[in-house]
Amino acid sequence: MNSSLNRRQFIRRGVLSAGGVWLITSGRGFGKISPNEKLNIGCIGTAGRAGDDLKEVSGQNIVALCDVDERNLAKAAQNFPRAKTYTDFRAMIDQKDIDAIVVGTPDHTHAVATMAALKSGRHVYCEKPLTHTISEARLVTETAHKLKLVTQIGTQIHAEKNYRRVVELVKADVIGQIREVHVWVSAVYGGMNLPANYPPAPSYLHFDSWLGPIPEHPYSPEWVPFKWRNWWAFGGGSLADFGCHYMDLPFWALDLKYPVSAEVIDGPPRHPDSTPPWLIAAFQFPARGPLPAVKLTWYHGGKRPSKQVSEDAAEWGSGVLFIGEKGMILSDYTKHQLLPEKQFVGFKAPAPTIPDSIGHHLEWIEACKTGGQTTCRFDYSGPLTETALLGNVAFRVGKKIEWDAKRLRATNAPEADQYIHHQYRPGWKL
């Protein structure tokens, strides 16, 4: 959709169909609107992280709420009594006065909800990771790009000042060319066996809607509502959860996109159902113009770089370490330091070149109104998501993946296809 269309012009065009994409016209129209006019927003998910997203966009008109848990839905509806309520996002998308949609569901329903929202012509804010599988990420990214809709992934740390200052240091060549990066998080998910018993789903939970496109599973409190990240069926463990947050910094600073390989350096025995509670994996990125090839090593579950790599980094619970020809930068969400410290005594940081963010959600809202761009649009966050998910693929097949990003293919491991491409039950598609 041409984002320059006047809202009032768009409404007159009725329901459009092009290239298999169906567009619902809003009762208010789409495209650029006055910055003083509020967006009509629909939220898929109302509790947990989705509840935080709802709070962040609550300054706009919340006209629709969807949650598979009727208790969460009723609680949210008390705060937004004018919003229509749904337990199935597909019905919510039919509501014609929605301008933009926030997707805050578990990973396994990100793609179907986001794609449906995009195809209906709505701008989308989606929680990270963007999707559950690599093929979903590519399709969602390409669709958003084709339709020229405003998108943002939920990597809210990207909007904080600390990441900006680190990116400026890297791009100012303060530590020289960087060929090695280490990224680690303390988070632990997985390492579990399937439940022994499966009680009936509670009456307030629309469990079939919660499952969405994935093969049928019996209900278990071991995955609904909070433990789903432990299981391959619904999430991707620590790497899928925190990879998009912590890899975001080197992706931004080093202009990374698609890796050429991914391999597991060390990890626990593979489990068919549950994600690895700890892992060490390596990703190789090609040269980008004048920038050299980069090896990024990932750690989670309490694993971290050895003291031989950096004694300082070994003391941080989670962080990112850039190793350059002239020094190192160590960072986490809120702070950073140059290493070795004695080498940078008296160092004066360059003047800031990256403007401070107005807020991660506000950035998206402003872009929806004006036709601008966000910093974590799907063109950027799609490849970031694909990289994190590729590490899980390498773990699950038990070998190094030689990656053909253009064709979404592990050239040396055809058995990896089952983990790369989405497989939906009948009645569901992107």
Image (cartoon, rainbow, N blue to C red):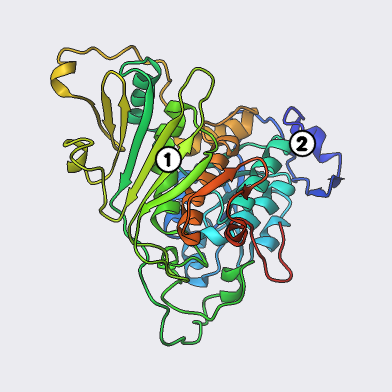
State the quadrant of the N terminus.
top right
Would you place residue 109 above or below residue 31 in this image?
A: below
Percent x, y of residue 238: 39, 55
User: Quick one: label 2, few (<14), some, or many (20+) residues within 10 Å?
Assistant: some
Residue 216 marker: none
Q: Quadrant of residue 142?
A: top right
Q: Which residue is mark 2?
A: 1
What element does badge 2 sit on?
loop
The reply to whether dot 1 and dot 2 touch (C-beta < 8 Å) is no
Q: Which residue is mark 1?
A: 156
Nearer-the-camera pick, 320 or 90: 320
Instruction: Give the number of marks.
Output: 2
- Which residue shows up at 22% across the image and 43% down it? 306
Percent x, y of residue 338: 23, 24
Q: Quadrant of residue 250?
A: top left
Would you place residue 293 above or below residue 139 in this image?
A: above
Q: Is residue 338 visible?
A: yes
- How far apart marks 1 and 2 lie (CA) works out to 27 Å
Q: Is residue 322 left or right of residue 64?
A: left
User: Quick one: label 1, few (<14), some, or many (20+) residues within 10 Å?
Assistant: some
State the quadrant of the C terminus.
bottom right
Q: Is residue 55 left or right of residue 420?
A: left
Q: Is residue 126 visible?
A: no
Nearer-the-camera pick, 52 or 208: 208
Percent x, y of residue 249: 40, 34
What element does badge 1 sit on?
helix
Q: Mark 2: which amino acid?
A: Met
- Which residue shows up at 69% across the image and 53% down it? 116
- Which residue shows up at 55% across the image and 40% down it? 383
Q: Mark 1: which amino acid?
A: Gln
Percent x, y of residue 392: 47, 55
Would you place residue 331 above or below residue 418 in this image?
A: above
